[in-house]
Image (tube, rainbow, N blue to C red):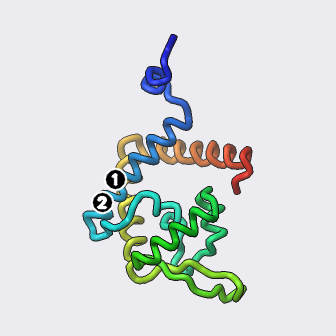
Amino acid sequence: MVTRAERNATDPDLGVLAGRLLFAVQRELFATLAERGFDDLKPRHGAVLAYLDPDGVRATDLSKLSGQHKQNIGILIDELESLGYVRRSPDPRDRRAKLVCPTERGLAQMRAADAIMADIQRRHAERLGRDDYEAFKRKLVDITEHQRARTGDD
């Protein structure tokens, strides 16, 4: 009988592969961010930072986009606010709602993270070939969206 560890070493399932990819990308991204002066961030903050826009985003939208529960997103927003990366401000379209907006430090982090992610993607595109990498990404997006639709994630 094959153990799970043996199976994951030789024929990992989609969840194991997705987790390995996520954690490896996060390790490189956050280590490089730390080298560039953002050493107070943790990978968990990525659930907010990855979806933050310069004009702000509602917490409910961050929850939907990231697939995280709204309560968890609220905790992360609180942490990022105390670290000086975001601030809450009234949504001009609905004064009852709040937008999570990046501060100047948040904008600097966003620029740095975008550059780091572009380098990671460029490296993989060069390794696989641009066409193969783009085909891989299209298929990964399709699988991801199909799975999210099955589980009710938007």
Residue type pointed to by label 2: Thr
Circle 1 crowding by C-alpha within 10 Å: few under 14, some 14–19, many from 20: some
For the point 60% across and 66% down, which residue is it? 62
Residue type pointed to by label 1: Glu
State the SS at label 1.
helix
Instruction: Determine whether 89 is above or below 15 in the image.
Output: below
Judge by depth and name the residue closer to the eye, 5 or 75.
Answer: 75
Question: Residue 53's x, y, as percent?
Answer: 54, 74
Identify residue for label 1.
Answer: 28
Q: Left or right of 146: which side holds 104?
A: left
For the point 57% across and 65% down, which residue is it? 73
Question: Residue 7's x, y, as percent?
Answer: 48, 22
Identify residue for label 2.
Answer: 32
Circle 2 crowding by C-alpha within 10 Å: few under 14, some 14–19, many from 20: some
Question: Residue 131's x, y, as percent?
Answer: 48, 45
Question: Residue 115's x, y, as percent?
Answer: 37, 65
